[in-house]
């Protein structure tokens, strides 16, 4: 009889510990400055690499070097550059305006809604002439 009671206590304790771990895990994920800093740095690298490659491709295109490759690069990689720019700019703006330990969802939505609208508008304008209506 005591083995069944011990097993039930072990299960309830393990469930209790598991619930604490899950709750702590989600509380930790809700705001983590290191994660924002990592994504900010990552998209900064993407932005600078793609932006620099656009300047180089434009210089090659204007000087008739590289054949059609610079023109292909400027027409292919414009959306990734735009997305990296919006994410990097949005994270920079959030990090500069936010000054607290808790996540500010109002600030996130205030920054994200115009950026998402701008991204959708840019995608529509990018494919405006190629998609038959």
Image (cartoon, rainbow, N blue to C red):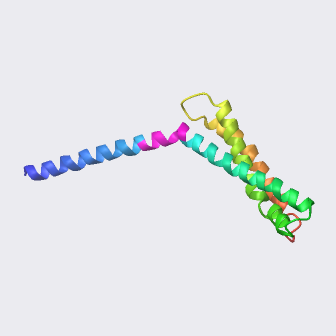
In which quadrant is the C terminus drawn? bottom right
Q: Residue at x 77, y 60 (%)?
A: 77
Q: Residue at x 60, y 34 (%)?
A: 104
Q: Residue at x 23, y 50 (%)?
A: 11
Q: Is residue 70 magenta?
A: no
Give 57 or 79, whichever is nearer the viewer. 57
Q: Position of residue 13 (x, y in %)?
A: 24, 44
Q: Say if 86 sits above or below 103 in the image.
A: below
Q: Is 60 placed left or right of 98 in the picture?
A: right
Q: Say if 100 sits above or below 72 in the image.
A: above
Q: Residue at x 33, y 47 (%)?
A: 18
| Residue 89 showing in the rendered view | yes
**Res 37 → quadrant:** top right
Magenta span of residues? 25-34
Q: Is residue 31 magenta?
A: yes
Extreme residue in the top direction: 99
Q: Say if 9 sits above or below 95 in the image.
A: below
Q: Is 108 placed left or right of 101 in the picture?
A: right
Q: Position of residue 6 (x, y in %)?
A: 14, 48
Extreme residue in the left direction: 1
Query: Secondary structure of the magenta portion, mostly?
Result: helix
Q: Is 15 placed left or right of 26 in the picture?
A: left
Q: Position of residue 98 (x, y in %)?
A: 63, 31
Q: Position of residue 26 (x, y in %)?
A: 46, 43
**Res 109 → quadrant:** top right
């Amino acid at each position: 009889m005591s083995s069944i009671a011990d097993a039930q206590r072990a299960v309830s304790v393990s469930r209790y510990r598991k619930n604490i771990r899950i709750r702590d895990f989600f509380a930790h994920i809700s705001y983590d400055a290191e994660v924002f800093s990592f994504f900010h740095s990552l998209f900064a690298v993407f932005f600078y690499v793609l932006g620099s490659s656009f300047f180089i491709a434009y210089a090659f295109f204007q000087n008739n070097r590289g054949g059609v490759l610079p023109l292909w690069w400027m027409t292919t990689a414009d959306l990734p550059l735009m997305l990296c720019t919006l994410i990097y700019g949005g994270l920079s703006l959030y990090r500069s305006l936010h000054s607290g330990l808790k996540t500010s969802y109002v600030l996130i939505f205030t920054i994200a809604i115009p950026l998402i609208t701008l991204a959708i508008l840019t995608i529509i304008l990018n494919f405006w002439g190629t998609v038959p209506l």
